[in-house]
Image: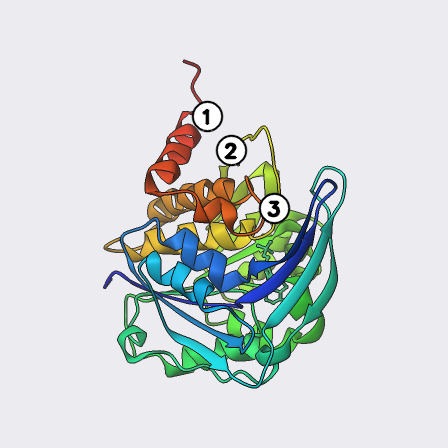
Amino acid sequence: MNNKLLAIGTMAFDEIITPTMESGKVLGGAATYIGLAASYADAEIGVVSVIGADFPEKYLNLLTSRGIDVSGVERVTDGKSFYWKGKYYDNMNKRDTLDTQLNVLAAFNPTVPKRFLDASVVMLGNLDPNVQHKVLDQLTPNKDRIVLLDTMNFWMDSQLAPLKNVIKQVDVITINDEEAIQLSGESNLVTAAKTIHNMGPKYVIIKKGEHGALLFYKDHPFYAPALPLEQVIDPTGAGDSFAGGLSGYLATQQEVSAEVLKEGILRGTAAASLCVGAMGTKGLEVSDKEAFLQQLKKLNRLRTIA
Ligand code: AMP
């Protein structure tokens, strides 16, 4: 492993409505959350994404200030950035997408910066599976490489065949419970995990929001609870933060085993807990490495009474 994480995903304008707040247009996107969350690990991180003329430079500077290489972020000077609007209900467990505008994502042809072509860890964050595929095609061979993939129902509905094609090539898939059911066509999570495992990934991680995450590997599922929180302000980006915390950690390891993955899941869970404590990316923006390590400590203490 060479300590390099290549992350791809959307960089976006989001509008989020919760039962008590409306965000207005704020910074969002899978790659943004992944990058910020991964930056708690001491890995070299490069992001590949696409933005329009409207995307403020200060958002790119935010990523740069966390040590993230943004040379793989293409700006389309006559286009608009990806836009997503979502609304949460009552206890924040249910979310509806109100609007998705692909804009510059629709014609995106990604270019992986030279420095990250040999990355040992590749996090294919949520975006068009055809773009995920084009990124994999550019990489130079690396026998130790671990490829992770995250996706959502939007791409299952619109690009199922290309999505299944990419899934064949990945080692780890992170997916939420509803999406696992949709992708597999099963009605039970254990059988869903088996079916998805048969599609390619050796490790299947099913996220269950406030109920934690399950890792399916061989016949022994591993369960990592989420950190019980007094207040969830906005769950947007929790899944991407989980992916960032996990993949950033994997990039710092000598090799990836089930044990390393379990620790990575705890790191992903810790990052997600910081994300949901504030609106949009703010929870990650205001939390430094110390805050991240505190969450990790709390997670490790969950099973003891002191
Ligand atoms: P999460 O809450 O982890 O599912 O991620 C929410 C983020 O995903 C938001 O910041 C959105 O900009 C982004 N997003 C929403 N829909 C899509 C989509 N279809 N493809 C890629 N990213 C998306």
Apparent side of residue 268 relative to residue 4 in the rendered image (left or right) = right
Residue 179 at least partly seen: yes
Secondary element at image label 2: loop
Kind of residue indicated by mark 1: Leu
Kind of residue indicated by mark 2: Leu
Q: Are marks 3 and 1 in contact (CB under 8 Å)?
A: no
Task: Find disc 3 in the rendering and name its residue.
Answer: 235
Assess disc 1: are there few (<14), some (14-19) or many (≥20) residues with their C-alpha within 10 Å of its C-alpha. Answer: few
Sooner in the amino-acid sequence: mark 3 or mark 1 = 3
The image position of residue 115, as x and y in percent, is: 27, 75
Sooner in the amino-acid sequence: mark 2 or mark 1 = 2
- What number of labels is visible? 3
Secondary element at image label 1: loop
Sooner in the amino-acid sequence: mark 2 or mark 3 = 2
Task: Find disc 1 in the rendering and name its residue.
Answer: 302
- Location of residue 111 with respect to 251 vertically, above or below: below
Apparent side of residue 249 relative to residue 273 in the rendered image (left or right) = left
- Location of residue 300 with respect to 67 vertically, above or below: above
Q: In the image, ligand 1 is in what quadrant?
A: bottom right
Tell me where residue 155 sits by quadrant.
bottom right
Mark carried by residue 227:
2
Residue closest to the eye, 264 or 73: 73
Assess disc 3: are there few (<14), some (14-19) or many (≥20) residues with their C-alpha within 10 Å of its C-alpha. Answer: many
Residue closest to the eye, 25 or 179: 25
Question: Residue at coordinates 33% horizontally, 47% vertically from top-left?
Answer: 260
Secondary element at image label 3: loop
Question: Residue at coordinates 53% horizontally, 69% vertically from top-left?
Answer: 167
Residue 220 at least partly seen: no
- Location of residue 100 with respect to 202 vertically, above or below: below
Q: CA distance from mark 2 to mark 3?
A: 13 Å
The image position of residue 193, as x and y in percent, is: 58, 53
